[in-house]
Amino acid sequence: MRNGSPLRQRAEAGWARSVHPAFRLVDGKAVPVRWADLVPAERGQSPATMGWHDVSAVRLHAGRPGRGWDGEPTTGSDQYVVPAVLAAVLPFAQGTVWVGQWIGRGTPALVGARHMSLWQGAREYEVVTLDEQVRASLLSPGPSPLMPDLLWDDGATFFVLTDVDLPSTLVGCTTPVPRALLGERRLEAYPVAGSDQVRA
């Protein structure tokens, strides 16, 4: 955790955005729905930088279903997306891997955690190392007691960012990590540029 922030280590070679799935109820079970399946065909657009309203024509947190879906995407750390992102990026990790959880969640304090502030204090995090216990918790199916909002390694190979207000996960990474993310079948991931205007 040099200089208190993973962002200062080196510039990322590329970015990928993984949008969180919506859900459709089938026989009482929640089935993931891809954003690409909800974009009207006549628009001919990729969801890479689109917001949820652009895709569904329904505002996020509107509290009602839409065409082809019953439940909107989760915001922040998603229990389906996190294990798949980890599976894609961890093989490329160099040195210690760090996990940050936003302190505003109101969850119990993490034992042995460090404190870190980013974006001029706009977000504050508890930070722990990705040891075997934390890794197992995050990679196992279902909810985890730790909800990672940040994930990075000492080698600055990747920097994973979610936000409690956003229905997608952004990953800044060096090659060949983007290819691994885009090839992870459990993710709906798209390549994006650092200059792209990504909508919520």
Image (cartoon, grey):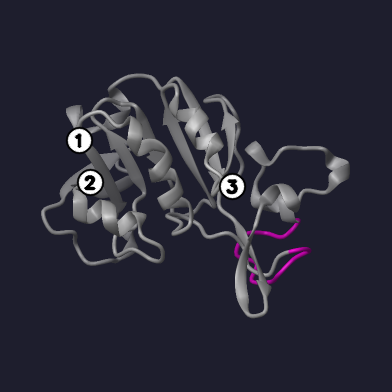
Q: Which residue is mark 2?
A: 130
The residue most toward the bottom is 28
Does label 2 or label 1 sit earlier along the sequence? 1
Cα distance in 3D space between marks 1 and 3: 31 Å
Mark 2–mark 1 distance (CA, rounded to whole Å): 7 Å
Tell me which amino acid carries mark 1.
Answer: Thr
Within-10-Å neighbours for mark 2: few <14, some 14–19, many 20+: some
Residue 145: % across, % down: 29, 65
Vertical position of residue 129 compared to residue 10: above or below: below
Region rendered in magenta: 57-68
Amino acid on which disc 3 is placed: Ala
Question: Which tag, 1 or 3, sits closer to the chain's start?
Answer: 1
Vertical comparison of 157 with 140: above or below? above
Q: Helix, strand, or loop for circle 1? A: loop
Query: Mark 2 to mark 3: distance in Å?
Result: 28 Å
Q: Which residue is mark 3?
A: 200
Which residue lies under the disc numbered 1?
96
